[in-house]
């Protein structure tokens, strides 16, 4: 008889400093992720996509497991998940598992690890606690986690194994789901005993722009992690954390699983020591919009043959920002930068106005700046260069296989700058977001992208250089400027930085 595994997912990355909460409708609609998916539909929707549960399904099926899909839901990062949203999705998952009690051999969960709700600092820990109460102490519960997980003691206690992504951009989401399936197979077959576990917290918060695994220090750190999995050590994870979460257990951690407690402790200690010794390497260079534009011009004048990418990191909806701030847009338009494009600006009103006016028309409109108090709408006369329905297939390594439905979209042109406007809030991490409105990104001199790191997966190959822009937005990259109230005292607010007093 094959082993039977219940599978489900509940994903949210919570920026507690962001202005918009994650309401139930956002999980039902998906906001750029697949919409709320139930039952057997999960087996059809996810296997083609770079999503952990899809990778788990593919690997588990090939290993001969029988799957009982329950529910999967996600929403774009934002502020707190509402009580209604959490309780609705958690009940779907818990009721589904309870109905299968006595007929399943394990539970797999596709979670993020940085969910904060209106009533729980640790959303994933609470969900795992409820599931453990249903299945009892002995049934294996295994979990895939985002690299930006804020690991908690409850999560570690209630799950048998938690395995995190190893790439940022997250190119290995499906791969991670597959790794969890293979790990579970060894537990169910008794090839490995129930694993001992160990977690170590690191003493400093890490900026997101320093977490990219394409560059140092993270590139070689993750290479080392893979090398550490041998002998009695079955799994190692390093989660650099998601710092705009005002919770006690926010921050980076390493965790290890092994056949013995001694091996788990030794591995966790070694990795934590290795990362802490490289603290000074987690540095970032942030430029104001005008500084980035001046540097881009110097690079172009110097003979750059590929686009200069300006990453508007603090308005990244993938980190809970509103995706509608206008600081970089205004600087680009007023500087008269040539042959430039900015993507994506979330403004359903502007997209609708452009569709009503029609391609080739000219409209005066206050673009963006409607959701974040630190930004104002940028009123100009824009030419409607092109419109689209927002439906397209992503082809890049991060979103690859995802069918986007961003609602009405428009390309608005002003003083040489083209702005891609959407009706859904999602970060610019796939070239198809430009191509949908007739722009071939490699042919532009300057590309503005509202993303922090995920864009690197699809844009590094066409970029002459990538400049990190610090323009006002709801995702604050400098943790030392955030007004924490719940963060534990004693942790440094940045590498080699000031200690949080609490």
Image (tube, rainbow, N blue to C red):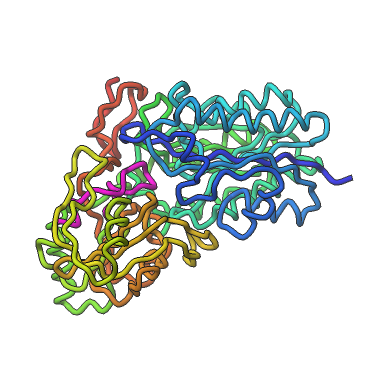
Name the residue at 48% across, 45% down. 147
Q: Residue furthest front?
A: 356
Residues 491 and 115: in front is: 115
Q: Residue furthest right?
A: 1
Name the residue at 71% across, 47% down. 40
Please determine whether, in this image, residue 151 is positioned above or below residue 215: above
Please determine whether, in this image, residue 309 is positioned above or below residue 115: below
Name the residue at 64% across, 40% down. 71
- On the picture, is 471 further left or further right than 72? left
Q: Position of residue 320 (x, y in %)?
A: 36, 41
Q: Is residue 322 magenta?
A: yes
Q: Position of residue 412 (x, y in %)?
A: 24, 64
Q: Position of residue 274 (x, y in %)?
A: 44, 43
Residues 192 and 85: in front is: 85
Q: Which residues are magenta?
A: 312-330
Q: Position of residue 288 (x, y in %)?
A: 16, 52
- On the picture, is 457 further left or further right than 265? left
């Amino acid at each position: 008889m094959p082993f039977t595994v219940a599978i489900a997912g509940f994903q949210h990355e919570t920026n507690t400093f962001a202005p918009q909460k994650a309401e139930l409708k956002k999980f039902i609609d998906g906001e750029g992720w697949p919409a709320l998916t139930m039952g057997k539909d999960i087996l059809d929707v996810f296997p083609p996509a770079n999503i952990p549960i899809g990778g788990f399904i593919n690997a588990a099926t090939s290993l001969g497991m029988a799957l009982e899909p329950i529910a999967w839901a996600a929403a774009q990062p934002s502020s707190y998940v509402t009580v209604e949203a959490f309780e609705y999705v958690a009940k779907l998952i818990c009721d589904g598992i309870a109905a299968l009690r006595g007929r399943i051999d394990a539970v797999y969960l596709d979670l993020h690890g940085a969910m904060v709700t209106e009533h729980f600092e640790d959303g994933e820990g609470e969900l795992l606690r409820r599931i453990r109460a249903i299945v009892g102490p002995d049934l294996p519960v295994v979990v895939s986690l985002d690299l930006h997980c804020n690991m908690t003691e409850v999560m570690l206690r209630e799950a048998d194994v938690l395995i995190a992504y190893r790439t940022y951009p997250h190119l290995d989401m499906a791969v991670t789901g597959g790794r969890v399936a293979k790990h579970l197979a060894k537990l169910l077959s008794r090839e490995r005993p129930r694993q001992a576990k160990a977690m170590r917290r690191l003493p400093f918060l890490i900026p997101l722009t320093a977490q990219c695994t394409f560059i140092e220090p993270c590139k070689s750190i993750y290479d080392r992690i893979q090398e550490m999995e041998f002998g009695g050590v079955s799994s190692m994870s390093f989660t650099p954390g998601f710092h705009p979460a005002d919770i006690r257990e926010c921050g980076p951690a390493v965790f290890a699983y092994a056949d013995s407690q001694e091996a788990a402790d030794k591995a966790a200690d070694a990795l934590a020591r290795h990362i802490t010794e490289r603290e000074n390497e987690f540095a970032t260079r942030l430029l104001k919009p005008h500084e980035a534009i001046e540097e881009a011009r110097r690079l172009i004048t110097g003979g750059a043959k590929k686009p200069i990418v300006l990453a508007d990191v603090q308005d990244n909806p993938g980190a809970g920002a509103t995706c509608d701030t206008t600081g970089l847009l205004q600087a680009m338009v007023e500087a008269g930068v040539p042959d430039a494009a900015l993507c994506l600006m979330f403004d359903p009103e502007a997209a609708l106005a452009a569709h009503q006016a029609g391609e080739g028309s000219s409209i005066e409109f206050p673009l963006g700046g409607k959701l974040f108090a630190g930004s104002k709408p940028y009123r100009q006369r824009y030419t409607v260069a092109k419109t689209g329905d927002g439906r397209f297939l992503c082809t890049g390594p991060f979103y690859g296989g995802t069918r986007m439905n961003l609602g009405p979209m428009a390309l608005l042109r002003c003083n040489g700058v083209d702005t891609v406007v959407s009706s859904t809030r999602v970060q610019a991490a796939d070239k198809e977001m430009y191509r949908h409105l007739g722009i071939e990104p490699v042919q532009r001199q300057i590309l503005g992208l509202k993303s922090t790191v995920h864009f690197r997966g699809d844009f590094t190959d066409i970029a002459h250089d990538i400049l990190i822009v610090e323009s006002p937005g709801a995702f604050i990259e400098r943790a030392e400027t955030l007004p924490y109230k719940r963060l534990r005292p004693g942790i440094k607010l940045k590498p080699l930085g000031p200690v949080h007093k609490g």
